[in-house]
């Protein structure tokens, strides 16, 4: 999902992308349709976040025989 309205807090700096549209089948955010912004003075009130879903990977701790 992609909550808007700066749900996770407003960003800072230049707004580089706008009108990002994902269908849900994309492997990465870069695969979504988007519009590069030519103007960089937009407010961050409408910044969107990304909540990923799908396959998860469980990582196991790695044991080491070396002393640190």
Image (cartoon, rainbow, N blue to C red):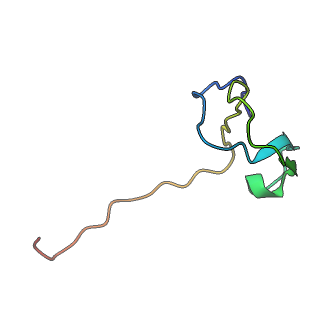
In percent of the image, x 85 and y 44: which residue is there? 22
In percent of the image, x 73 and y 26: which residue is there? 46
From the viewer's perspective, tell me whether residue 31 is left or right of residue 11.
Answer: right
Q: Position of residue 7 (x, y in %)?
A: 63, 24
In percent of the image, x 82 and y 57: which residue is there? 31
**Which picture quadrant has residue 65?**
bottom left
**Which picture quadrant has residue 2?**
top right
Q: Give the residue furthest to the left.
A: 67
Q: Position of residue 32 (x, y in %)?
A: 84, 51
Q: Is residue 25 above or below residue 9?
A: below
**Which picture quadrant has residue 20?**
top right
Q: Give the residue furthest to the bottom.
A: 66
Q: Could you tell me if residue 39 is visible in this image?
A: yes
Q: Could you tell me if residue 1 is visible in this image?
A: no
Q: Is residue 29 above or below residue 3?
A: below
Q: Position of residue 57 (x, y in %)?
A: 55, 55
In percent of the image, x 25 and y 68: which residue is there? 63
């Amino acid at each position: 999902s992609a909550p808007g309205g700066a749900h996770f807090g407003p960003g800072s700096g230049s707004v580089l992308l706008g009108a990002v549209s994902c269908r849900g089948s994309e492997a990465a955010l870069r695969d979504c349709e988007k519009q590069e912004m030519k103007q960089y003075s937009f407010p961050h009130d409408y910044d969107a976040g990304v909540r990923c879903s799908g396959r998860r990977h469980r990582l196991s701790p790695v044991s080491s025989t070396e002393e640190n």
